[in-house]
Image (cartoon, rainbow, N blue to C red):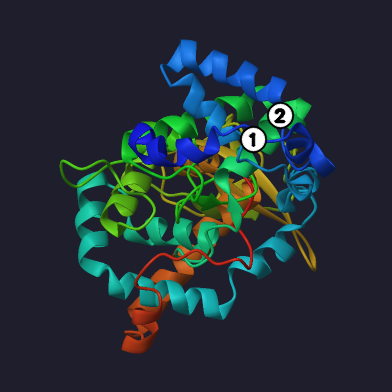
Amino acid sequence: MLRSILFIPLIAILVPRPASAALAGGTHFSRAQIVRFADRVARRDGLDRRRVIAVLEQARPQPRIIAMMNRPAEQVLKWWQYRRIFLQPARIDAGAAFWQAHRRALERIGAEQGVAPRYIVAILGVETYYGRITGPFRVIDALATLAFDYPSRSRYFAHELARFLLVAERDGLDPLTVKGSYAGAMGPLQFMPSAYLRYAVGSGPAPPNLLTDWDDIFASVAHYLRAHGWQPGAPVLSRVRIEPGATFQVDPDNLALDRTVGSLAAQGVKVEATEPPDTPVVLLLAHTRTGPVYRAGFNNFHALLTYNSSKLYAMAVDALARAIEQRVDESRPPAAMAAAVSRPRNRPDGVGPPR
């Protein structure tokens, strides 16, 4: 719990420090910001005001995070560039090995939740390379930086900062040591704190552990997708065939399921899937090195977009899922490779895709 974890450190933390030390070089957030935030979450969420202040006094601004927020990969890469990152043979091999290492849990949870193991594994593969790269930033630093020094989204990140403190209290986490992405996403799933609170699923009486317990991690991502409309056994993406004389238009920024398989067929766009004509779809445009390609996205594609709103992200998850499943079907990976991805780890060499 947050209170018990911080009780002993508070003796040292609450010892007054010279004001010059706290503010030198802009290495701390302003006292006024911290106090206003602590007052608000104490009233609204029931957190201990003094302890919130004590934790946030240990948070450090990270200017690099602001620069990263202003240039997320999804906004500057073409599909072929984004795909090249996540469809590397090494990532596919590691995903197949990971699946083999956790086959029983993945198949059990997949059957219970109605989410195929390939998509559980692929989300982990895109987010954090199967738990290898969960982020180098202290979550408290990332969220405080974005809550206090990023005006365009400060309200959202202030909410996530409060949720993070609630997660720490509920689950007995030390808020000063948990690491994550530059946006404050945590663990192999890169859940933001609000998603952690709402969708984490545990396997016993203890609070869910989405940092190191793979059963909880698998169950939670499947639970998240089902809560956002995932349909068991339904498709995610399909190739389309553009027939001669096709009369269609596509908005590259539109992600709504505002067409149907039948309406596309009437415009000369044949969806290469067996879904009924009244099945809702979105027509997607992506760019390869040789030119544009089109895909039809179904309801489950939309469910993936709730995890990350970039169409490139959802396309990468689907492509990686298919590639991993094919690799698993082809052969069982070496035991040594499976052992190498058997536990989630923090590494300081990068983060998953931005939120």
Q: Quadrant of the N terminus?
A: top left
Task: Tell me whether the residue at label 2 lies in contact with that at label 1, contact meaning CB atoms closer than 8 angstroms.
Answer: yes
Q: Residue 144 has which mark?
A: 1
Between residue 254 and residue 48, name the one nearer to us: 48
The amino acid on which the numbered mark 1 sits, given as a three-letter code, is Ala
Q: Nearer the viewer, residue 320 or 51?
A: 51
- Callout 2, which amino acid? Phe
The image shows residue 293 at horizontal and vertical percentages of 70, 57
Task: Give above or below for 18 relative to 342.
Answer: above
Q: Residue furthest left?
A: 205
Residue 270 lies, in percent from the top left, at 58, 49
> Which circle marks residue 3 in the picture?
none
Q: Secondary structure at mark 2?
A: helix
* Picture layout, residue 348 above or below residue 13: below
At 39% from the left edge and 40% from the top edge, which residue is drawn?
8
Please tell me in which quadrant of the rendered image residue 31 appears.
Answer: top right
Q: Which residue, given by chain and number where applicable, does mark 2 sit on?
A: 148
